[in-house]
Image (cartoon, coloured by chain):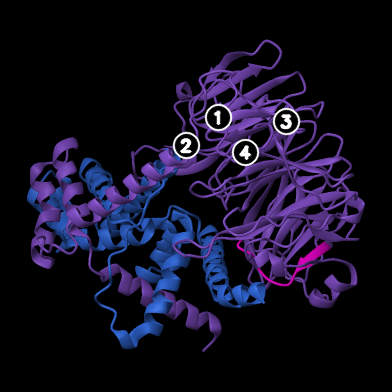
Chain colours: A blue, B purple
């Protein structure tokens, strides 16, 4: 089914491409949001990747690889979006609305989630991308490396480093209460 | 089930949950509106997001609409700007501080010091040989409990069980110095070379800080300056980072600053004679941040207002004039020249744009790199000259390191974007080298090597690089060290650092 849509889209069929984009939109946006940690910037990245996909759909040689190709466009769009923000020296103020989903008896779960959220934000966009394609998209190493446009060895290396960085960030969080007590004492 | 499996499962579960948590639809609506306004995306394609929104979410939900978040952000910004104005400051590009003057005029102080400078600390007469130890932080900081261990104390905690660095950086100056992590809870500093021989452990830390950098080596190579710190994003706990001096012969180490929470150390550099150390700290809001010149022979420290931002990724660069009578550093997004004694007021170098890197050269110029090109400021004549235009190269500049200009100001290295035949499809990050006097940037490292740490040789004639080879030895990355001769642009291998078991032979 998807293969047919890709072939039709490659020949300029708007409706076929719309169907492909509609089917991928939610996945793309969730992935971009995990990498960029911002809905607005994720929307921009998805927009850029879909635009690039439409403009260059004829570059897809293997219709069965459309999803991998689109994932790669998205990751590249996320990198560019992250760089744009970094180059402008923008300081983002993250406004977190009260979370109505967290019940009072789920404090521990919320604490773990918050800790992961903080740790994840400390990573670079490139590190987050590695973790997202591996743990969220669940791609095998070779495919994840292709999405990120890396050699497999480099992907493994970056996955290791990103995991290490995240663990370090979580460790730092774990230390905070102890450190504060020791310092005050 | 291993701890790693648990961690991976927890992370995967969290990513799944995060990916489907409610989205603030205002941002998506706005982005799709922007799509319709500014992009050639066909109207039929721009409907894609709208279909999805309509099917999965209620865009009329007032809790998460654009009005709430944007109003809150606006209120926060207004509060910050009003607060800043009351403190005599203006928000400029994410850094709180006075606007830099248009030319060589004394900058307005953030908080006027008692005199042009203030003596802010005096640990007592000492020399760096005794390794100064400051008084404890006013505000609690995790560095109050950190010890950099050397000698027998170091050996007691690390034994022979080095597993090599999972994160490495090259120190400037003689030999190759590497900071890294040992296992899940320790960190260390090692020396490699010059010449053949095993890597030599110098110091160890009994835990893993998030921020660990080699900032500088003393001119005689006897002492390394380390930055050790932590960051707490979205946390009420302030960021902390302090300066440590470590003897490169492994004979001692000590903390040099106690800056306290919220004033993390941003950068540090030895004076040309090695007697003084200049370091900068950052502050938030209307807090005072300072550039401090510490005389290590007397313990006298002179601080002057300067907020130059803080990055836990890249230390802030501080450069001494060759004679050691002036310092240059970025303050409030301007290049500012300081008298380290504080007797004369600082002056600003005429602005040239967003400064990415700078260096004070032996011939009395300050070379600056911006995202558009290179400028030379002649100290004697107080005139600026445009050297070349980086925009004309057509290379998209991504990320220069703070010390990406060679010591003589002739070369600049940066990570740049390179595209293939299909725009947007195969964007690659590669390392380039370009002469500051102009010319086409030369690709010197491919994408697999571009994540390397680089450092200039002291004579500016070579670029040293360390990058991961892609091989893993017992879960630790192998590092490859190389040397680029700037006359021939040819790489030569220095060797590899096998990660496991800790004896790093340099062929």
**Residue at which label 1 appears:** B108
Q: CA distance from mark 1 to mark 3?
A: 30 Å
What residue does disc 2 label?
B88
Chain designation of label 4:
B
Question: Where's the N terminus of chain A, which quadrant?
Answer: bottom left
Element type where label 2 sits in the image: loop
Of the numbered discs in the image, which one, if any, rests on residue B305?
A: 4
Q: Please give left or right for residue A24 compared with residue B391 in the image.
A: left
The residue indicated by pointer 3 is B407
Residue B150 appears at what percent x and percent y? 85, 66
Q: Which residues are magenta?
A: B202-212
Mark 1 or mark 3, whichever is nearer to me? 1
Q: Pointer 1 and pointer 2: residues touching (CB < 8 Å)?
A: yes
Is residue B393 found inside the magenta-colored segment of the image? no
Q: Pointer 2: residues within 10 angstroms few (<14), some, or many (20+)?
A: some
Label 4: few (<14), some or many (≥20) within 10 Å? many
Callout 3 secondary element: loop
Q: Quadrant of the C terminus of chain A?
A: bottom right
Q: Chain of mark 1?
A: B
């Amino acid at each position: 089914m998807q293969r047919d849509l890709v072939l039709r889209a490659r020949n300029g069929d708007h409706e076929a491409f719309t169907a492909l984009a509609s089917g991928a939109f939610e996945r793309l946006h969730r992935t971009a949001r995990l990498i960029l940690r911002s809905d607005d910037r994720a929307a921009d990245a998805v927009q850029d990747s879909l635009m690039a996909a439409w403009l260059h759909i004829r570059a897809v040689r293997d219709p069965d690889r459309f999803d991998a190709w689109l994932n790669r466009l998205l990751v590249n769009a996320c990198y560019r979006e992250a760089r744009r923000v970094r180059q402008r020296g923008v300081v983002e103020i993250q406004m977190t609305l009260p979370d109505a989903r967290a019940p009072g008896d789920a404090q521990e779960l919320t604490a773990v989630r918050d800790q992961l959220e903080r740790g994840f934000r400390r990573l670079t966009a490139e590190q987050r991308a590695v973790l997202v394609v591996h743990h969220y998209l669940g791609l095998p190493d070779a495919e994840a490396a292709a999405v990120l446009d890396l050699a497999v060895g480099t992907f493994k290396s970056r996955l290791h480093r990103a995991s290490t960085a995240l663990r370090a960030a979580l460790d730092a969080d774990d230390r905070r209460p102890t450190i504060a007590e020791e310092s005050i004492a | 089930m291993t701890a790693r499996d648990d961690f991976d499962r927890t992370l995967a579960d969290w990513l799944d949950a995060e990916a489907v948590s409610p989205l603030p639809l205002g941002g998506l609506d706005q982005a799709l509106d922007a799509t319709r306004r500014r992009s050639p995306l066909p109207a039929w394609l721009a409907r894609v997001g709208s279909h999805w929104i309509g099917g999965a979410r209620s865009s009329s939900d007032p809790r998460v609409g654009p009005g709430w978040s944007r109003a809150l952000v606006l209120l926060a910004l207004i509060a910050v700007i009003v607060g800043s104005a009351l403190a005599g400051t203006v928000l400029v590009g994410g850094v709180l501080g006075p606007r830099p003057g248009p030319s060589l005029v004394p900058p307005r102080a953030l908080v006027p010091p008692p005199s042009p400078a203030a003596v802010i600390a005096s640990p007592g007469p000492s020399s760096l040989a005794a390794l100064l130890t400051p008084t404890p932080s006013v505000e609690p900081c995790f560095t109050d409990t950190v010890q950099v261990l050397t000698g027998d104390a170091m050996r007691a905690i690390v034994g022979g069980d080095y597993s090599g660095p999972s994160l490495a950086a090259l120190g400037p100056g003689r030999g190759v110095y590497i900071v890294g992590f040992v296992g899940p809870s320790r960190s260390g500093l090692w020396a490699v070379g010059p010449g053949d021989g095993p890597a030599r452990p110098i110091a160890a830390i009994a835990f893993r800080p998030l921020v660990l950098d080699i900032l500088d080596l003393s001119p005689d190579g006897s002492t390394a300056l380390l930055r050790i710190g932590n960051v707490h994003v979205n946390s009420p706990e302030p960021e902390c980072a302090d300066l440590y001096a470590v003897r490169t012969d492994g004979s001692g180490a000590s903390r040099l600053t106690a800056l306290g929470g919220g004033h993390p150390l941003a950068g540090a550099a030895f004076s040309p004679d090695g007697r003084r150390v200049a370091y900068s700290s950052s502050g938030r809001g209307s807090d005072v941040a300072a550039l401090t010149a510490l005389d290590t022979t007397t313990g006298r420290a002179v601080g002057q207002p300067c907020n130059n931002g803080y990055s836990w990724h890249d230390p802030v660069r501080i450069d001494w004039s060759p004679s050691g009578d002036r310092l240059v550093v970025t303050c409030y997004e301007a290049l500012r020249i300081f008298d380290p004694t504080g007797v004369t007021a600082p002056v600003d170098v005429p602005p040239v744009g967003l400064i990415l890197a700078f260096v004070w050269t032996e011939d009395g110029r300050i070379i600056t790199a911006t995202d558009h090109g290179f400028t030379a400021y002649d100290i004697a004549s107080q005139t600026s000259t445009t050297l070349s235009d980086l925009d004309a190269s057509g290379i998209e500049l991504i990320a220069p390191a703070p010390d990406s200009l060679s010591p003589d100001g002739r070369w600049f290295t940066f990570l740049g974007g390179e595209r293939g035949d299909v725009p947007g499809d195969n964007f690659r990050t590669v390392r380039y080298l370009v002469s500051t006097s102009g010319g086409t940037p030369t690709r010197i490292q491919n994408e697999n090597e571009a994540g390397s740490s680089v450092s200039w040789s002291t004579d500016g004639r070579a670029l040293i690089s360390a990058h991961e080879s892609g091989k893993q030895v017992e879960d630790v990355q192998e590092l490859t060290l190389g040397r680029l001769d700037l006359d021939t642009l040819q790489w030569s291998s220095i060797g590899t650092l096998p990660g496991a078991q800790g004896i790093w032979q340099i062929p």
